[in-house]
Amino acid sequence: MEWFSASGYWLGRLVFQRGLAGLYLVAFLTAALQFRALIGERGMLPVPEFVRRVPFRRSPSLFHRYYSDRFFAVCAWSGCAVAVALLAGADSLLPLWGGMLLWLVPWALYLSIVNVGQTWYAFGWESLLLEVGFLAVFLGNDEVAPPVPVLFLLRWILFRVEFGAGLIKMRGDECWRKLTCLDHHHETQPMPGPLSWFFHRLPKPLHRAEVAANHVTQLVVPFLLFAPRPVATAAASLMIVTQLWLVLSGNFAWLNWITIVLALSAVAFPADPPAVPGPPLWYVVVVLAVSALLLALSHRPVRNMLSRRQVMNRSFDPLHLVNTYGAFGSVSRIRYEVVVEGTADEVPRKESGWREYEFKGKPGDPRRWPRQFAPYHLRLDWMMWFAALSPGYAGPWFGALVERLLEGDRDTLGLLRGSPFPADAPPRYIRARLFRYRYTTWRELRETGACWERTYVREFLPPTRKP
């Protein structure tokens, strides 16, 4: 069975598993703290209404059988508990089959959440966590050496993440081909981080070099993952460095971190492997069967990557076993933000005392500097960025958000950085206005202390009150 095992990657497996457990913990914690306002029984897109419209076969989930906010909370916090156990190495204390079952639990729980999460869970890193999490079930524990087929499939996912992202850029916005996208991206990205202003102000020649290096990392380096060990380790290490650069430049939930964790599984750390017996026959059969299934399903993302009509971030099956990925096929040149305001006046007027709601991550007050939230995922803030791009993105949920603010709903207010109105005295009217935001210059920053300058564009939602 020497062909089946790769004992030299035992430390890489250990680092990968602990890193993945940490990301599971972040994902379940995000779900537990935000679900009531987003998809709860009184949420903006309630799960009970969704499961009445969509059959189980299209979105398999525990919540098709039963849903209550209490049951969802139990599932989310149970996911947190299992993730902590895996982070602490509980899978290594169990027999091989027990460790596999333990890894299966968070995958099944998170699949149940994603499949009823609707718009709030339509991000590529949700499917990526599920695809990687499913493979982790078959990676084994201290009883066996890392299986070669699973290690290969992890690299195959990493290849598709990077190469797919590179292709979508080259086929999409011409600024990627002209090496000019970073003249705009740091300013217009969904959720800037504390260093994004400084990245935007880097010299333009350096921006060109960044884009060129990105193309090399995403279009050339992924092929080296399947080279012999020293080359593959170097390729994975280069990807890790690139992803850490992206971590510093913005807030992209756990997308960068799960890519780093994937790359770590391809690194052969210089450490002597422990002596372990050969894998049991049943384990070999299961791993080979699952690997054959996933390779067979891979024809769909391959066809998508080869297509001139390549799409980003799509699942090809309801279990999210094999998916396609990509990011920023186009880059906005101008940043727009939807600013939500309320007033307690009986009759709303232009000169009324409109007070602004502040969100946790998205830009609002021009003087408030962005914070680092990733890998934690602020789902409402991200969707507000999409809403500013086009009102169509806000259609399913924005009206419900306004209604909850008019009610002073505590769960919804909990998603915000702060409310200008106490929960027991909500505003009489809510309005939303669209502003253009741009980063200030060095001189403006010194003179005003503001990192943003904003200009009113148009009305997004006229003054609205509760029926």
Image: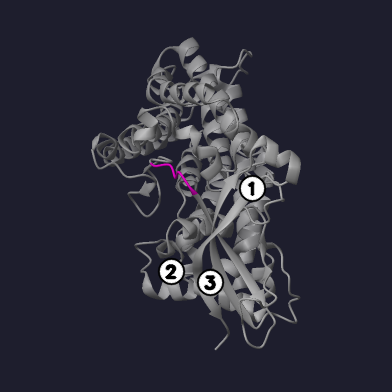
Q: Position of residue 74 (x, y in %)?
A: 64, 64
Q: Which residue is under mark 1?
A: 452
**Which numbered mark, 2 or 3, is in the foreground of this view?**
2
The residue shown at (56%, 78%) is 463
**Of discs 2 and 1, which sits in the foreground?**
1
Residue on which the image places disc 2: 395
User: What's the residue type where badge 2 is placed?
Assistant: Gly
Q: Mark 3: which amino acid?
A: Met
Residue 332 on the magenta segment: yes
Q: Residue 377, how many percent across, how many down?
A: 60, 51
Q: Mark 3 points at which residue?
A: 44
The earlier-in-sequence mark between 1 and 3 is 3
Image label count: 3
Q: How crowded is mark 1: few (under 14 residues within 10 Å), some or many (20 or more)?
A: many
The three-letter code of the residue at mark 1 reads Trp
**Would you call the spot at circle 3 few (<14 residues within 10 Å), some (14-19), or many (20 or more)?**
many
- Quarter occupied by residue 92: top right
Question: Whole-percent x and y of residue 200?
Answer: 58, 34
Q: Nearer the viewer, residue 72 or 429?
A: 429
- Answer whether residue 128 is visible to the viewer in this image: yes
Q: Which colour scheme is used?
A: one colour
Q: Can residue 277 be seen in this view?
A: no
308 relative to 69 in the view: left or right: left
Question: Which is nearer the N-term, disc 2 or disc 3?
Answer: 3
| Magenta region includes residue 455 | no
